[in-house]
Structure formats: structure tokens, C-alpha cells
Image (cartoon, grey):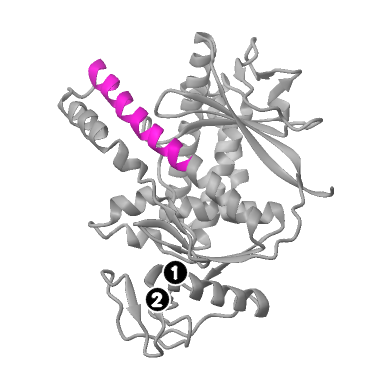
Amino acid sequence: MAGRVVRRAFKYRFYPTAVQAEQLARTFGCTRYVYNRALAERSRAWLQEQRRVTYADTSKMLTGWKRDPETAWLAEPSKGPLQESLRQLQGAFDRFWRGQSRYPKFKKKGQSKESATYFSNCFTRGGQIRLAKQSEPLDIRWSRPLPEGAVPSQVTVSRNARGQYHISILVEDVIPELEPADRVVGLDAGITSLYTLSTGEKIANPRHERTDRERLAKAQRALAKKQKGSRNRAKARLKVAKIHGRIADRRRDYLHTLSTRLVRENQVIAIEDLSVRNMVKNRSLSRAISDAGWSEFRSMLEYKADWYGRRLVVIDRFHPSSKTCSACGEVASAMPLNVREWTCRCGAVHDRDVNAARNILAVGLTVAACGDGVRPPRT
């Protein structure tokens, strides 16, 4: 069966030796320093001289920093991760100029992800992976095999707040084509039910954070009582991070299972363009909304639909999907959140969420048929 060639990352856990852990810690620190210093230089040049600094300029600065006796330690790690940190900063500025994100922020130790990216000239692979300037290969737990004949183009090593090390290996992989499906579906996001399908099915919300809420609160209270800078505080902080990590792992696994199922079963999937950033400002629902992982789920649907040749349609967030009757099209004047079932003037009795999902599907099919420029009328 034919397939599509995509760039895909395979993530594995690995266990570094004491020497490797120390080398990685220095590399993480150097990449963070280079990123912050380049950001400071770019900000200063613009504020004081109205001059825009490019990636090429910061690359030349990096060469000078390595030769400076005060920062000669920047020459210890491989050059690849340092150059990549400058590329990441350039990407952050590109997104800022396009209005897609805020102005780049400085990275703080312990508060930002520790990672380093090595390109093909900075690591070797012969059944095992050995990073540049390391004498021993990494002890990787190969939980699943890499695609046969795949040649890694880059690897990214990272350390999370739980102290776990992971390596992400980027390769080209062939994704088998799926047979065209004769089903379409609309999704309405919610709290009581994580998602309601236009077919009437309701996906239960596991509420992963609620399961560990008492344990998390206890660990956070213990952390608050520890003296700053002490070893006991570091231990308590690690315990909190482990609980958060378990919650995130369970949520991610659940969303992966659900998104894969929907993509395999449906040719077209329609969802709403939710502004999660604004929705979490609601203090009564912010915890439940954050636990639902709507943004993460949408991201999964986007790249999986692209992989398998499906169509994901995102409709206008201002479309009154809950207030519109899916039978006759009449729009109700108001629809408070506490109203879960309502009757239209035409006599149709609607479940609020199922009705919304059906309307989302109808608008999504219109967009799919007529083009992405179609937008529902705003009331």
C-alpha cells in the first residue's frame, strides 16, 4: 500500500552515566546562556539603536563569545546545540513579528525546559547513539523500533522537571495511506463530557487532575513549608513535579488514543476554533479547562489528519452552534450554560451538546465544500 513520507520524531527514555549527566547539564546551561545573551543583544540593539539584529549577526557574536576569556567555557559543548538555540530565538522573533506570539522571554534555570539539539554532524549512530564530545553511547530504552532503513537527521536530548532524560530522534517515515472513509463527524468540546460527537456519542472526561488533586495539594503544602534553597525543598519540588508529570502522561495517552480513533474512522472532522487562552481566565472553570487539554487535542488532530489524508475543518469561534436549531436553523435569543436541553419552536427537542456538534459539522462541511474563506454569519 502506498504511503506518505513525513518527518517524524520517535521519543525514548535514556539513562545517562554520571559523566554524561554532568556534560549534558553543562550543555543545557550553555544553550540557555547563549539564548538569553542573544536575546539581550537583540533587544538592546533595537531599543538603543533602532537596529534589527539577524540570526547571522548573533552567530558571529557566538564566535566572539567563545574566544572571550570570560566565556571561554562556551567552547566545551558541541557547537550544534548552541547554534540551534540561536535558530530557536530567530523563530521566536519571526512568530512575534507575524503576530502569532508575544515578545520572546528570557529562559530561567529550573523554570524552562532543558534541551539540546544535535544535528547529523554532531552525533554518530551504529546501532547506538553517541553524542559529540562523549566517549560512551547513550543507554536508551528502545521501547519501539525505528523505521527500517531510517537515517536520523537530528536528535534532541532533554531533561524534564522529574529528572527524566529523553531523546527525540527525527527521521523520515512512510505513513501508510488509509482507505477513504464514508463518515464525517463534528465535535463539541465540553467539561462534563470531554467531547460530544454529532452522532450523539459522548466522550467521557476522565478528569485526570481531579484524581490526584488531594495528593498534589498535600505535596504543594509540604513544598511551601520548606526553606528556599534547602535540599528538602528540592526533594519536595521533585515530588510535586512527579505528580504533575503523571497527570500529564495520562492525559496525553488518553488524547492520543481518542484522536487516532477519530482520524481513522472519519474522512472529515469539524471542530470549533476555541480561544483557550481567554477561556482559562474564568476562575470558576480555569482548572477544568486546563485539565481538558483542548489545545493539545487540536494539535494532535491537525498533524494526524495531515498524515493520513483526512480533512480537519476549524469553524469560526463566534458561530452560535449551541443556540442554533439543527433542524430548522432558528437561532435562540439566549442559551445559558445551565440549560442542557431545550425545545425549539419547530418542536425539535435538543440535547445542547449534541445539537452544537451537529451544527459544527454542518458548517464544517460547508467550509470543506466551498473553501476556507466561508464563515458563518455573526449575530
Q: Is residue 249 magenta?
A: yes
Q: Residue 210's spot in the image, x, y percent? A: 29, 42
| Left or right of residue 37: residue 16 | right
Q: Which residues are magenta?
A: 230-252
Q: Residue 266's spot in the image, x, y percent? A: 64, 60
Dot 2 amino acid type: His
Residue appearing at x 25%, y 31% in the figure = 215
Q: Is residue 188 magenta?
A: no
Farthest residue, direction right: 1
Q: Residue 189's spot in the image, x, y percent? A: 43, 61
Residue that numbered label 2 is attached to: 350
| Left or right of residue 356: residue 343 | left
| Corner quadrant of residue 237 | top left
| Left or right of residue 243: residue 101 | right
Viewer-nearest residue: 204 or 126:
204
Mark 1, residues whose alpha carbon is within 10 Å: few (<14), some, or many (≥20)? many
Confirm whether residue 372 shows in the render: no
337 up-or-down from 172: above or below: below
Provide the major secondary structure of the magenta segment: helix
Residue appearing at x 31%, y 52% in the figure = 288
Mark 2, residues whose alpha carbon is within 10 Å: few (<14), some, or many (≥20)? some
Q: Which mark is residue 354?
A: 1
Residue appearing at x 39%, y 50% in the figure = 205
Q: Residue 2's spot in the image, x, y percent? A: 84, 49
